[in-house]
Amino acid sequence: MDLDDTIVAIASAAGGSPRGAVRISGPRAVALAGDLVGGSLPELTVATAIEALIPLDANRQLPATLFVWPGERSFTRQPTVEIHTLGSPPLLSLVVSRACVLGGRLARPGEFTLRAFLAGRIDLTQAEAVLGVIDASGDRALQTALAQLAGGMATPLAELREELLLLLADLEAGLDFADEDIEFIAPEVLAQRLETVTAVIGRLVQQLVGRGVADEVPRVVLAGPVNAGKSSLYNALVRRYGSHSNSVEAIESPEPGATRDYLSASVKLEGVECSLVDTAGAELVAGDPSPRSAAQTKRQEVYAAADLIVRCSDAAEKPADTAGELLVRTKCDLASDSAPMHSAIHTSAATGAGLDSLATAIAERLTAGTGDLVPSTAVRSSGSLHLALEAVTAAQALAACGESEELVATELRLALDELAQVAGEVYTDDILDRVFSRFCIGK
């Protein structure tokens, strides 16, 4: 990648809007912006906003505000100009085309953020947080990404690496003067500092708990006995929260075991995308060789792959309280006032009662305890953080047994190497490609 190129792209969201933005960054960004407005911009030393007109043809001019960062205090640490103007896609595309004719180059996906990373403005966890902000599907995901972008992981990671480097320096100084009667770090101080480092890495590892593979959609399975209203509830939820592509509905029938296979549909509940699954009833029919029995056997496999099980029961019945499951009472429109009360969520597929409450409860369950990292960071960092934790734990054990400080130092070097990969201090082109190829152009 040539960092001497001046890159340009539309930086605002796709589609029409009152305002849009075109971003230019690189050594010639200010000069290129001056060419765009038909002249040259004044000599600048600080960030400045300039009102200007961009000639479109001999008779038309496009009003714009140019936000100019002339030095290295921009996001990319290169001269940068953002052109804010009318948010018409054809007009923004025309500005980009003109900039490319005047010497700019269309930016590749994620190239602005990649330049910020390569310039040391952000580390790799913050670069991934930029994508997390763009892809956030709900308030919780957005807040998680913003916290990580603000240094929620970068700051403790940097402090942790600094402490390990200082500790390693003390140990290696002792090794250099092994023949002298000099103690650079007392055993009890070494043990205390190792304990602190282990605790910090342990907290970072804990943040990974609950995170699956990046972009993996959680599975929510409707479970319960036959005729518990699962299929009716499934259809009601899909109609209200599903995408238009969900065209297959579950069979609703008073006959026990009408569901002979499981169905799944994509739904978005309170901004959380998930796969909703309808399964066969829980009871097996003794000696039944029909497909019904096969579906009920398959049900166990579906349960095992579920991120959340929603346990359904008829409103006239009291559901069994199963740990970790979300309890729901269906057909509440048919229940009498004397129906047994329970802490489960009360719903009715016929009237729609309780569906919003159920959607909120499912979303809260799916997002609770998922840690404070965007999914892509959690997946990429998981192996390195676990290896770093193993290394410092081994260093602790060696120090406690009075083993050679050289062995302790070796484990700390391993931990530092793994943490460097998390921060992006050590990387390969393959890693950068996996991170930045998912960005859109202009970010």
Image (tube, rainbow, N blue to C red):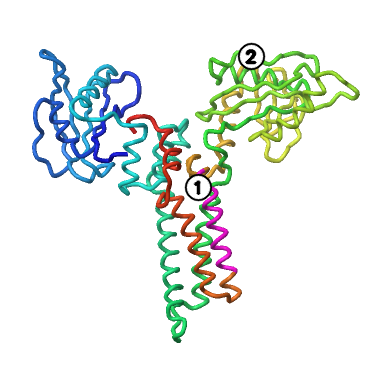
- Please report contact status of discs 2 and 1: CB closer than 8 Å, yes or no: no
Residue 51: image quadrant is: top left
- Judged from this view, the residue extending furthest toward the bottom is 181
- The residue identified by callout 1 is 381
Q: Amino acid at mark 2?
A: Val
Q: Main secondary structure of the magenta part?
A: helix
Nearer to me, 85 or 121: 121
Nearer to me, 181 or 151: 181
- Judged from this view, the residue extending furthest toward the right is 287
Question: Image quadrant for the N terminus?
Answer: top left
Nearer to me, 345 or 66: 66
In the image, residue 103 sits, relative to residue 207, either above or below, namely above
Report the side of 163 relative to 53 (left or right): right
At 52% from the left and 45% from the top, the residue drawn is 371
Q: Residues within 10 Å of mark 1 (few under 14, many from 20)?
A: many
- The residue identified by callout 2 is 248
What percent of the width, then of the height, locates residue 288? Answer: 88, 21
At 44% from the left and 85% from the top, the residue drawn is 180
| Helix, strand or loop for disc 2 | loop
Residue 396 magenta-highlighted = yes
What percent of the width, then of the height, locates residue 82? Answer: 23, 32
Q: Amino acid at mark 1?
A: Ser
What percent of the width, then of the height, locates residue 403? Answer: 58, 75
In the image, residue 253 sits, relative to residue 67, either above or below, namely above
What number of labels is visible?
2
Magenta span of residues:
380-397
What's the CA distance linking mark 2 and mark 1? 39 Å
Residue 113: image quadrant is: top left
What percent of the width, then of the height, locates residue 401? Answer: 61, 74
Report the side of 341 relative to 405 (left or right): right
Disc sitting over residue 28 in the figure = none
